[in-house]
Amino acid sequence: PAVKLLADYTPPPVMVDNIDMEVQLHETKTVVTSVLTCRARPGVSVLELDMDSSMVINTGSGISINGAPAADVSVSAENSKLCIPIPGDVSSAGASFQVQTKVVVNPEANKALEGLYMSGGNFCTQCEAEGFRKITPFPDRPDVMSTYSTVIIADKEKYPVLLGNGNLVESGACENDTTRHFAKYVDPWPKPCYLFALVAGKLVYLKDFFTTMSGRKVALRIYVRDGDIPKCKHAMESLKRSMTWDEEKYGREYDLDIFNVVAVADFNMGAMENKSLNIFNSKYVLASTETATDADFISIEGIIGHEYFHNWTGNRVTCRDWFQLTLKEGLTVFRDQEFSADMGSRAVTRIGNVMRLRSAQFPQDAGPMAHPTRPESYIEINNFYTATVYQKGAEVIRMLYTILGPDGFRRGTDRYFELFDGQAVTCEDWIRALAEANPDKDLEQFKLWYSQAGTPKVKAVVTEGGAGSNTMTVHFEQTIPPTPGQAEKLPMHIPIAMGVLGPDGKPVAFRVGSADGEPVMETVLDLKAKQQTLVLYDVPSGSVASLLRGFSAPVDLEYVGITTSQLCFIMAHDTDSFNTYEASQQLLTQAILENVKRAQAGESMVELDEQIVDAMKLNLADSSLDPMLRAYVLSVPSEGTLFEKVELADPIATYRARKFVKEQLASRLESTLRKVMADLEPKLGGEYSLDPTAMGNRALFNASLELVATMNAQEDLQLCLRRVENATNMTDALAALSILARKDCEESTVAVSLFYKKWSHDYLVVDKWLRIQATSAGANALDVVKQLVSHPAFDISNPNNVYAVLGGFAMGNPYGWHAAEPKGAAYQFIAEQVVRIDKMNPQVASRIVSCFTRWRKFTEPYQSLMKAQLEFIRSSPGISNDVYEIVEKSLA
Ligand code: HT7
Ligand code: ZN
């Protein structure tokens, strides 16, 4: 397959200023007629339109230019380009000309869920990144921006609701066929074709309105299947909060009279920001207390916000080419993270962001798929909707925010919109706008974050009294590991936020750089050189430095020589909540890794240090702390993050050591845990609330219950069972179910079956039930997963089901996945499923095949057995480019 290179970019030979579409919807034969108003660059004599082999086109009579049949039209060898010669008189002097095409497509046969397809009996579309070419021939690239008018025509009974981008300008019955009706939409804002959307079906809606800052009234509607309206309230409230927030924080107002959201059950990703017609995976819209967890409510708010924020960062200002994807995604993730932080608890939101970065992006940055936030080459762009482009991309924006400060950053975004509204631009353009608005800042070196892959490692050595009395010297050294295609790296610009805790645990006011500098409580060091030293003055002896506060840069920090007691001290006293959490995670990581070595050597494990137990007790018992933070501090690092800490990971020894430490926490903290649960109990009843404290209380109770349940006392198992049966909210029911699903006991069997009986009518809750089993089962997980795949509730063509069962097993259950017997049986099963799914839906298959990417990370026999399955997939006939790219790069 062809490799696309950023270096090969050239501007579009033909611009399309406007497109008029007519879409005659039929399940198997939809007819799409498009009229493109084009302008060719001088010297361009052939109009090349992207198309897809699945569409039927009559190159003889199906195409005309300025009303006359086009001559010598050809379709390129792989059926991917329609080549239409432009007669000389038509394109002379850059004049506009009109090209009409007519094609037939088959939505019902489209199981790839890209282009026009059917979900639950309704028509819908997904065009990002390159799906528009599956609907109509078009220069399918984001730097071709056009205005759109769309006439949608469909059977009136089966598809009463017809939705398109922009404003509805006309609708009614079709004159020539009374069984059909039409709706015409006009979108006045020029947009790239990946933002095109249409929906037709039997849908009902929740309506509301929003008055913008300039006083315009915008109609808001959320379209769902009959019966689901009561579950749309949270999404609607989130949408209104997003609209207000974007006005207040960025001065961005919504620009049309209507904003629609549609929920569909079959969707490859989370949601899509189509202009004024966002289409969502229904799991990110529908929520009620009974069916959705606290985490679901938070995700819905974040994703509704994310897609809405794209209206400015992505839609009004878009990407020049797909290499620039992080321009819109990194910035929009940063915006949604900040929105969530403002709506809930800032500290807790930040910890969640970093957990996600570390569990998904750090491994990617250290493996064969590592790429810069702005990749330089790809085979299939759908493979680059990655944690690096999204999550690391958001960290890049966050660092810019830290470097420029809130006011400088806002000046920069204002300048960005002022310069580039209505254009398709690059990451360089973004930095240019920020730099123009902040002439005192130099962002040149910072740009390396866009071009260098790999997680920088920062070593910090802290010494006291180095340059005189009452000083603290912090010496930093940065190294960036080699990544595919990038052996050597230049030092990066890394902002390191830091503070100091005095010997009494109180924050210290210190001076930076000279003894007569201004006293500050916190500073941000611009680490730019490979090695750099910072001297802090007025620091009392016995103080401890608190480094990388708030995780101010996406780096792997090694605080050389920090002791267990200093980490416990930070955990107890730091005013930076992120570092409180971080200290606990480092302490637990060290304890687990020590025991991994012992497990490998066949030695007995060492108990948890008394200091750690005491620090944990202190945290647990401190009811003045945010309960969610207390729950996070108690959380044991995931196996995935532990694997990253060693050269070669032994999954079984890691599992055993982690389990041991968890049991240690449970038994050594038992009385405190039980007291916490007893104190929380009365606060948990009453009306369900999404207030951060209420959510934190539930999280802390459930985290405590999970720990005490590791001791398998009958009364705790019974309590879990009762909670599965009687909990009035899904957060508590699911937490209890996941505790039991990990065990081999009577209560577990009963809980799993009664949960299904209770919820079999709700496909989103059934999805949770599928995932919990796939992620929780132990050594018999492969058998469990095989049963789930043949369960009537599982549909292999539904991405959510596949991600829940196959993704949950291969990427969310390290023990079950690696421990399956005979060794490698689970890998073989998943490889076979990948090949099967790839025939229907390459995007989903390539997400699942990523479970093999890090095969080199594991000890034998795991690595050889995983590699063998990659080779099996590579040799399977007809694999898609999507899967091929991941497999080939993994094996390289
Ligand atoms: N911009 C969207 C990314 C996307 C997507 C969404 C649904 C299905 C397939 C997709 N391919 C790419 C979603 C977002 O980041 O906002
Ligand atoms: Zn996005």
Image (cartoon, helix red, strand yellow):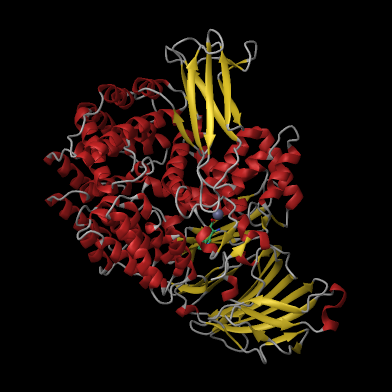
- Tell me if 66 is positioned left or right of 257 in this view: right
Residue at image location 26% in from the left, 48% down from the top: 738
Residue drawn at x 47%, y 74% is 118
x, y percent for residue 333 = 54, 48
Quick one: which residue is furthest to the front in this view? 487
Q: Viewer-proximal residue, 157 or 708?
A: 708
Q: Can I make out residue 700 in this image? A: yes
Q: Nearer the viewer, residue 143 or 877?
A: 877
Q: Position of residue 286 (x, y in %)?
A: 42, 56
Most distant residue in the bottom direction? 60
Left or right: residue 189 versus residue 748 is right
Q: In the image, is residue 332 above or below residue 519?
A: below
Report if residue 206 is visible in the image: no
Give the position of the C terminus as an image quadrant.
bottom left
Residue closest to the eye, 363 or 546: 363
In the image, residue 815 above or below residue 158: above
